[in-house]
Amino acid sequence: MIRAASAALALAALAAQPASAAPDGGRLFMLTCKGCHQPKTSVMAPSLQGVAGRQIAADPVFKYSAGLKAKKGTWTDANLDAYLTAPAVFAPGSLMPMSVASAENRAAIIAFLKTQK
Ligand code: HEC
């Protein structure tokens, strides 16, 4: 939970940036996602290497929530955007507490995820 709190603080700091600064998806990921999502799956979160286009809840090691496991399909841009907007709406009971309010920031993070093969 300390990690979730620090991620929330990082988001608050980002929100204070001037609107003209183009969001850097890699930096946003480092500040708001990496606390939980490491290159290798941990008890905290599944690995997001290659997540773009992958089957939803397909990491062989991570114990997903029933809500996310019940989702069919793959991580398209639209699904990633919906999940990052409101994880518990996209997948009721999802274990992920983090959401990203800004559409611009979501797009930047999704573009970054696609580079993580
Ligand atoms: C506090 C820890 C935490 C943070 C911070 C976090 N996540 Fe997650 N994330 C999780 C957990 C736990 C799951 C598994 C959710 C479930 O099983 O319902 C998950 C699942 C996911 C998935 C689905 C993975 C799959 O294999 O289907 C994606 C995509 C994702 N997170 C993206 C992100 C992004 C992008 C960020 C940063 C904006 C982020 N997460 C921040 C904990 C976190």
Image (tube, grey):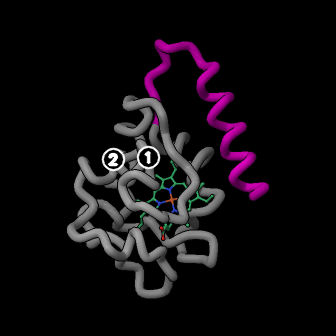
Nearer to us in this view, 106 or 117? 106
Q: Is residue 16 magenta?
A: yes
**Residue lying furthest bottom in this view?**
60
Residue type at mark 1 is Ala
Query: Left or right: 15 with respect to 20?
Result: right
74 relative to 109, above or below: below
Residue 86 circle label: 1
Instruction: Determine whether label 2 and label 1 are within 8 Å by CB.
Output: yes
Q: Which residues are magenta?
A: 1-24
Q: Is residue 111 magenta?
A: no
Picture coordinates of residue 44, whole percent (x, y) = 63, 71
Picture coordinates of residue 8, whole percent (x, y) = 67, 41
95 relative to 101, above or below: below
Name the residue at 78% across, 55% down.
Answer: 2
How many numbered marks are there? 2
Name the residue at 69% across, 52% down.
Answer: 4
Quarter of the picture containing the C terminus is bottom left
Name the residue at 35% across, 65% down.
Answer: 51
